Structures are given as structure tokens and as C-alpha cells.
Image (cartoon, rainbow, N blue to C red):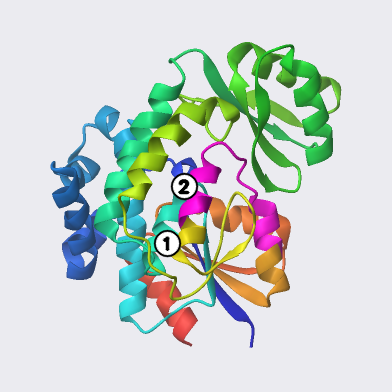
Amino acid sequence: MGKLAFLFPGQGSQYVGMGSDLFQSFPVFSKAMREADARLGFPLSRICFDGPEEKLTLTANTQPAILAHSVGVWRLIESEGLTPDVVAGHSLGEYSALVAAGCISLSDAAFAVRRRGEMMQEAVPVGEGTMAAILGLDAETMSGICRQAAEGEVVEPANLNCPGQIVIAGHVGAVGRALGLAREKGARRAIQLQVSAPFHSSLMKPAQDGMIGVLEKIEFSDLIFPLINNADVELITTGEMAKAGLIKQIVSPVRWEETVLKMIGMGVDTFVELGPGKVLSGLVKRVDRKARCLNVEDAESLQSNLAELKG
């Protein structure tokens, strides 16, 4: 029998307040949402389910909302006696994965990711930085395009998601030049994303500097089960390693394709995405079509996939 991996989504899941059915029906889930409310000092859960949407889509609110939702789902799965052999999270999702692994508390994680969202937004003035998705070119080609397009500005690979899907980040002008070069090189698609900052690029250095102080005040314990981190694709087992990875990932690309391949190399054949959306499940399938992918984001998917996992 193969091994089991739990995956935790990042902000790319485009969270729009899913999970109201879980909140109403499962005290374990609602308790997780309220823990985040208590630490943040305002009713985030109410904003999640009642809006207004423009408030929820602010990155400083979206990040803790996705975290609390994902951890709530994890606690539901855990209460059914299911535990993974390994975990990973995409960007923000690495915090959710570390909560699941017993490394940091949900309360501390909610505080940290809210500050992370604020600092990332403050690192680059709105309108100066952006991101773009490139489909159909490999990582080596895109790295060369970024070097050529920079012209004294910053443009770098930010998400290496799966074969033929790379996200770049940097200054607006440099990203625009990279898009043009990517199209010339035969990219199937090259589009600028509707994001508020150039995440996972060296332009996030002010956010990285600020987050060092935030994370130093948080207690990190050794992990109950291992995590593969974004920045180094390393198997993390200690609290110190986990903290270092969170600091490094702010300015480093998310190496998701390599993460999935490492899990497969460890014998993982079942991937369960815990939290809003199915973005990571889709990326895993692009890496290995034979992989078994499930997701739990609401009451319906909880019921159907619990039966399959336990069966």
C-alpha cells in the first residue's frame, strides 16, 4: 500500500468564503475559525461567510481565512483517525501544514500570516510590481527569458508549479517584457495576473526582514510528521528548520513540481488537498497522471472522500 500526503492550498485558491456548511455543522471546524478570530481581534469568520467580498479579498484577511479553513478541515480529518506520512503547503499553505504537524499553534499562525499579508503588500507600492503565468515553456527557458527581460529591474520565477506552468514576479515593466519574449519563444499562454504584489521574488526582501521579527516571537516545536518545504524541497522535521524555511520562502520561488516528485519518490500515491479549492490537486495530476487526488473543502467532499479514504 502506498503512502498518504496531505496538501494545504495557498492564496491561488481564490478563497471566497467557502465552508459555511462546515462551520454550521461541525464544532471542530467552527472552533478553528473562532481561534483565528480570537487571536486577530476581529470576527474574520463572519467576514468569510457574510462579506463584504472586497474586505475578504484583502490579502491580510484572505491569508488567515484560508489558513483557518484549511486547519479546520485538517482537524475534521484528524478526528476520523487519519494521519499523513508527509505534508506540504503551497506558499501560505506551508503555515497550515505546520499547524497540522504540531509545529506551531493555529493562534500564532493566524497572527503570523496576517502580518505576512500586510508586510508583503507594503513591500512594494501598489502598481509597481506584478506577476504573470506562463504556460508551455520549461523552467530553464523561463529563467533565461527573465534574465533577458530584466534590463536593470527585477523579474524572476516565483512559482514552479508543474511541467509547463510557471509564474513569474517582479517590476511591471520587466514582467511585461518577459511576457513578450515568452510569446516569441512559443508559450501557449502568457498572461498578467490580477495580484497586488510580486510575491516570492527578491522585491519581497522588506517583508522577509519584517517577518524574521514576527517568527522569532513564535514557539516552533518539532514536527509530528515531516513536511517538504517550498524554498529548498527539503524534508523538515525540526522547529528550527521549519522557521528557517518560512523566512526563506518569502523571497524564494515555490518549487511545487519538485515537491510532488519528491513525495512520489517517497512512495506517496494518494494526495489529499485540505482547504478551499482544487488547485493543488490539478497541479499534482499535471506532474503525475496516475496519482490519486482527493480534496476536502466542504461537507459534501468531506463525506464522499472520507468514505473513500477509510474504505
The magenta stretch is 243-261
Give how far across and how far down residue 50 sits, in percent. 18, 40
73 in relation to 150, above or below = below
- Residue 271 in picture, x, y percent from top left: 56, 68
Label 1 or label 2, whichever comes before in sequence order:
2
Residue type at tag 2 = Gly
Residue 221, by quadrant, is: bottom left
- Please tell me whether residue 239 is drawn above or below residue 80 in the rendered image: above
Residue at 73% from the left image edge and 71% from the top image edge: 265
Q: Which mark is residue 10?
A: 2
Residue 139: percent from left, percent from top: 78, 40
Q: Which residue is mark 1?
A: 98
Q: Is residue 272 above or below residue 46?
A: below
Q: Work out how far the residue at label 1 is from the one at label 2, CA to CA, in angstroms.
A: 13 Å
Residue placed most toward the observer, 51 or 7: 7
Q: Position of residue 161 (x, y in %)?
A: 65, 47
298 in the magenta segment: no
Would residue 296 be seen by someone viewing this image from the given angle?
no
Residue 43 seen in the figure: yes
